[in-house]
């Protein structure tokens, strides 16, 4: 059975807005590695609109650093599923717009052969966490106190996690890899 993974940047005080995060080459390389271990990315409208067209353009133009270009190529090439009731269409290559049941889609994908299933964005991840369908969590904790912004799992139930690995970065950020402990 395939694993559902969720990876996100978070500040020390628990906020997940992209405005205050460190975005250096080392962190882009880390997230590129996670993408390469997955063969589908699932997210909602907000994340879709945050990522497209920026990362698609970088993938096409190779206009940033080597690490950012690699991340862009990996993200651009991975099949993506966007769950949204408000988007009329999606333009990104390898992207499917779905309005059907998110839970059923993830359960079906878990049964298919393949690599990890990657979940992106707070809203989708909160829903999937409530159903206890996330197998592994990757939190990259940034040495920033943001003071405001979107929070992680504000409405999402309790989960026990086991620390599998940690990786410090030169920026002071630390990647924490947890496995879900199912009761």
Image (cartoon, rainbow, N blue to C red):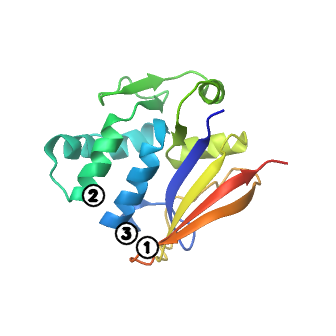
Q: Residues within 10 Å of mark 2 (few under 14, many from 20)?
A: some
At horizontal 28% and vertical 50% (from top left) the residue drawn is: 70
Q: Quadrant of residue 96?
A: top left
Instruction: Give the residue number, with chain letter if any, for mark 3.
Output: 22
Instruction: Determine the CA span between mark 3 and mark 1.
Output: 11 Å
**N-terminal label among 2 and 1:** 2
| Residue 111 shown left or right of residue 37 in the figure | right
- Which mark is in front, 2 or 3? 2
Q: Secondary structure at mark 3?
A: loop
Residue 40 x %, y %? 47, 34
At horizontal 35% and vertical 27% (from top left) the residue drawn is: 94
Residue 63 x %, y %? 15, 52
Please tell me which residue lies in front, 166 or 98.
166
Q: Which mark is residue 67?
A: 2
| Residue 169 shown left or right of residue 63 in the figure | right
Instruction: Give the residue number, with chain letter if any, for mark 1.
Output: 169
The image shows residue 43, relative to residue 101, as above or below, that is below
Q: Secondary structure at mark 1?
A: loop
Q: Which mark is residue 98?
A: none
The image shows residue 13, relative to residue 47, as above or below, that is below
Question: Do callouts 3 and 1 mark residues in contact (Cβ within 8 Å)?
Answer: yes
Residue 158 x %, y %? 77, 54
Instruction: Determine the CA span between mark 2 and mark 1.
Output: 15 Å
Q: Secondary structure at mark 2?
A: helix
**N-terminal label among 3 and 1:** 3
At horizontal 22% and vertical 57% (from top left) the residue drawn is: 66
Quarter of the image where the N terminus is located: top right
Instruction: Determine the CA span between mark 2 and mark 3.
Output: 14 Å
**N-terminal label among 2 and 3:** 3
């Amino acid at each position: 059975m395939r694993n559902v993974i969720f990876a996100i940047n978070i500040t020390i005080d628990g906020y997940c807005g992209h405005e205050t995060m460190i975005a250096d080459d080392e962190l882009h390389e880390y997230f590129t590695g996670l993408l390469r271990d997955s063969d589908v990315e699932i997210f909602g409208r907000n994340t879709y609109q945050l990522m497209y067209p920026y990362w698609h353009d970088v993938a096409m133009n190779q206009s940033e650093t080597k690490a950012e270009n690699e991340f862009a190529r990996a993200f651009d090439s991975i099949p993506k599923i966007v769950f949204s009731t408000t988007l009329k269409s999606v333009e990104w290559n390898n992207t499917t717009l779905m309005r059907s049941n998110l839970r059923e889609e993830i359960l079906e994908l878990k049964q298919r052969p393949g690599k990890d299933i990657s979940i992106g964005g707070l809203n989708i991840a909160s829903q999937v966490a409530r159903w206890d369908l996330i197998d592994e969590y990757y939190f990259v904790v940034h040495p920033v106190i943001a003071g405001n912004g979107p929070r992680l799992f504000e409405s999402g139930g309790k989960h026990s996690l086991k620390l599998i690995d940690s990786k410090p970065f030169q920026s002071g950020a630390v990647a924490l890899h947890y496995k879900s402990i199912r009761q």
